[in-house]
Amino acid sequence: MSGPEPTPLFVDTGAFYARADEDDKHHETVKRVFDGIRTGDLAYRPVYTTQAVLSELATLCLYKLGHDDAVRALTAVR
């Protein structure tokens, strides 16, 4: 018997930003979700986003967290 069929998931800026900002109130929850997707414990596949989301994430992180954290946030999306 196999597990549930994977569900496609669209990730918007808020989730990516919460993952990048350790002070965000949703950081730990989002981190667990992303870790679960990465390990296969959560059946969300494929995971989608857009160039507009990535651009917004870069701008938000640059202004709120700084250059190094913005680079880390965008690199983590891969």
Image (cartoon, rainbow, N blue to C red):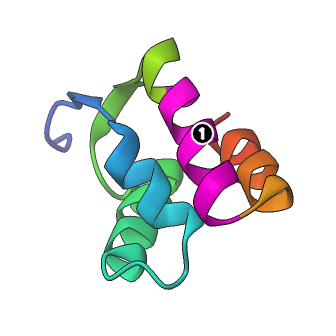
For this rendering, which residue is in front, 8 or 52?
Answer: 52
Q: In this picture, which residue range is highlighted in magenta?
A: 54-65
Question: In the rendered image, which residue does mark 1 sit on?
Answer: 59
Q: Where is residue 77 drawn, in percent x and y?
A: 62, 39
Q: Residues within 10 Å of mark 1 (few under 14, many from 20)?
A: some
Q: Residue at x 25, y 31 (%)?
A: 9
In this rendering, position of residue 60 left or right of residue 52: right
**Residue type (three-letter) at the residue carrying disc 1:** Thr
Q: Where is residue 59 drawn, in percent x and y?
A: 60, 39
In this rendering, position of residue 69 left or right of residue 57: right
Instruction: Indicate yes or no whether the magenta region holds residue 60.
Output: yes
Q: Residue furthest front?
A: 63
Whether residue 55 is situated above or below residue 30 in the rendered picture: above
Whether residue 46 is situated above or below residue 59 in the rendered picture: above
Q: Residue at x 69, y 40 (%)?
A: 74
Instruction: Indicate yes or no whether the magenta region holds residue 27.
Output: no
Chief SS of the magenta region: helix
Q: Where is residue 33 drawn, in percent x and y?
A: 35, 62
